[in-house]
Image: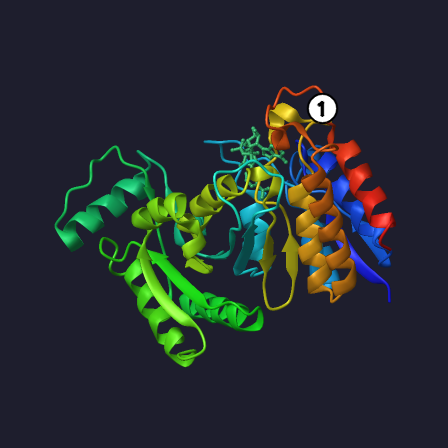
Amino acid sequence: MTHTITLIPGDGIGYEVSFAAKRCIEATGVDIQWEEVSAGADAMEKTGEILPQAVLDSIKKNKVALKGPITTPIGTGFRSVNVAIRQALELYACLRPVKSYAGIKSRFKDIDLVIVRENSEDLYAGIEFQEGKPETLELIRRIEKEVKKKIRPDSGITIKPISGFASARIARFAFRYALENNRKKVTCVHKANIMKFTDGLFLETAREVARDFAGKIIFEEAIVDNMAMQLVTKPNNYDVLLLPNLYGDIISDLCAGLIGGLGVAPGANIGEDAAVFEAVHGSAPKYKGRNKVNPTAMILSGVLMLRHIKEDNAAIKLEQAVKEIIAEGKFVTYDLKADPFDPSCVGTKEMADAIISKLKQKV
Ligand code: NAD
């Protein structure tokens, strides 16, 4: 069967890692027809739009996409294309497996946890009021009148909406995922002691959903700051973590650090009608075009994609090839060497080549 899949190479290191992943996926022998579309800086140059409608149409049609990272300049009017894609296609669940591979230098061994991050609301909803604007001053006046608390007039404001609907939807996703993947426990991460009406609602909703899975999946709660400490001391105590959007983003990078860094952390954004597979890392602009960064995170995102399209055999073989190359430690990028300046490290392309050779012995 031929699978038609949207490919968004991204920018910065996006081209290098997405093409490395594409080559590895093709080497599994799965029949894929790629539909390449561009978003981000490149699309802006070519079409004047950072997220052309054609990109969304292609993902909607094919229902599956592999996406490289896209730069979001800080503090400009240029909103995140990544967030825009997730919102436009209602890719409400962000799934990020965090798994140790032998051969990677890391403080911990045998970590195997999964982050389930709510992807559609919270401080990422993009509802912001700029400091000094008349509408911001009006909002400040209304809030002060309503809640009798002072807000400095030179404040900017970002709104944090969290709904019962989206909280129940992501909690059900986390519990269903746990059940289907032989996981034992879901830990809901929150700051409900401070944000009672947003995180409080997220937590209360998770508790309700947990009741439907009682006896099958253990439910646990953790305050986010304590969770950060627990994860850097006892990460093996955790299984599936359920988090609102912002905490999910931060804890994802922390967990990537537990298993050897962003170079090996894959991810997926999943909705009812479509799924987009992408690494946790960004576009690392300083490494653009240098054939330097680790393609593993994108390749493992490809493994998640292969599972999603029910090509399990191909997924198992590709993951195994990645595992073996990392364990051998020879054809790996700088970040996987004990000394990052080790002259024997290889480039992005060469690591992908080694994975492909390994794979060819299995196919
Ligand atoms: P980043 O993840 O791009 O890079 C941070 C550092 O992590 C790099 O300097 C590098 O040392 C390391 N790193 C990242 N990927 C690596 C890889 N594959 N191999 C080896 N090392 C790797 O984070 P940043 O610098 O904060 O963000 C750069 C841009 O990417 C920003 O514009 C940000 O908004 C964007 N971003 C995009 C996505 C996405 O497209 N989904 C995700 C995160 C950040």
Q: Is residue 104 left or right of residue 205?
A: right
Q: Position of residue 150 (x, y in %)?
A: 15, 42
The residue that label 1 is drawn on is: 290
Pinpoint residue 208: horizontal percent, then vertical percent. Answer: 35, 75
Residues 119 and 114: in front is 114
**Residue drawn at 32 percent across, 62 percent down:** 221
Which colouring convention does the figure follow? rainbow
Report the side of 333 relative to 141 (left or right).
Answer: right
Q: Is residue 57 visible?
A: no
Q: Residue furthest left?
A: 148
Q: Is residue 94 visible?
A: yes
Q: Mark 1 belongs to which amino acid?
A: Arg
Figure disc tally: 1
Up-down relation of residue 307 to residue 289 (above or below): below
Residue 255 percent location from the top left of the image:
48, 45
Q: Which x, y percent locates residue 82? A: 58, 46
In this picture, residue 205 sits left or right of residue 69: left
Nearer to us in this view, 111 or 220: 111
